[in-house]
Image (cartoon, rainbow, N blue to C red):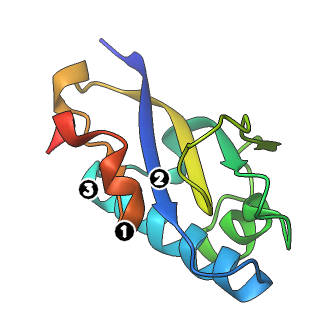
Amino acid sequence: MTYSRGIRGATTLSSNTKEEIKSATVELLNKMTEENQINTEDIAFAIFTLTDDLNADFPAKYARLECGFNMVPMMCYQELNVPNSLRMCLRILLNINTKKQQNEIKHIYLKGASVLRQDLK
């Protein structure tokens, strides 16, 4: 049986530049797809969010150009500006079609974003 599963990932950036957004997007997506053994044709859609201090570029652009997400529907959004929340943060949600059970999915939190889901370590 094939299931629809979500895979979460997040990372922090050191600056609001196109280069940093590109680097962080590629690093995080590569780690998410490798750890979960995902082929791009199994990705139903991808959602990217950025905190309001990151606006130099669209992460979906680099998913398409650098990671082969040419046929994957993608959207970029601004994360809610919640007081005292993690800043300079890129988050990704991949919705995939897979035979894996939910407890087999590996969510990826890099750099400063590792504080977001310490329960998944």
Instruction: State left or right for residue 24 relative to residue 76.
Output: left
Q: Measured from the top left, where is residue 79 in percent x and y?
A: 72, 40
Quadrant in which the N terminus appears:
top left
Q: Residue 111 bears which disc, if any? A: 1
Q: From what the image shows, is residue 19 above or below residue 104?
A: below
Q: Secondary structure at mark 3?
A: helix
Disc 3 designates what residue? Answer: 35
In the figure, residue 26 lies in which quadrant? bottom right
Tag nearer the camera, 1 or 2: 1
Residue at image position (68%, 47%) is: 48
For disc 2, the neighbor class at 10 Å (few under 14, some 14 to 19, many from 20) is many
Q: Measured from the top left, where is residue 69 in percent x and y?
A: 66, 58
Residue at image position (85%, 73%) is: 56
Q: From what the image shows, is residue 91 above or below residue 62?
A: above
Which of the pair 100/8 is nearer the observer?
8
Tag nearer the camera, 3 or 2: 2
Circle 2: residue type: Ala
Disc 2 designates what residue? Answer: 10
Quadrant in which the C terminus appears:
top left
Q: From what the image shows, is residue 77 above or below residue 6?
A: below
* Residue 51 visible within the image: yes
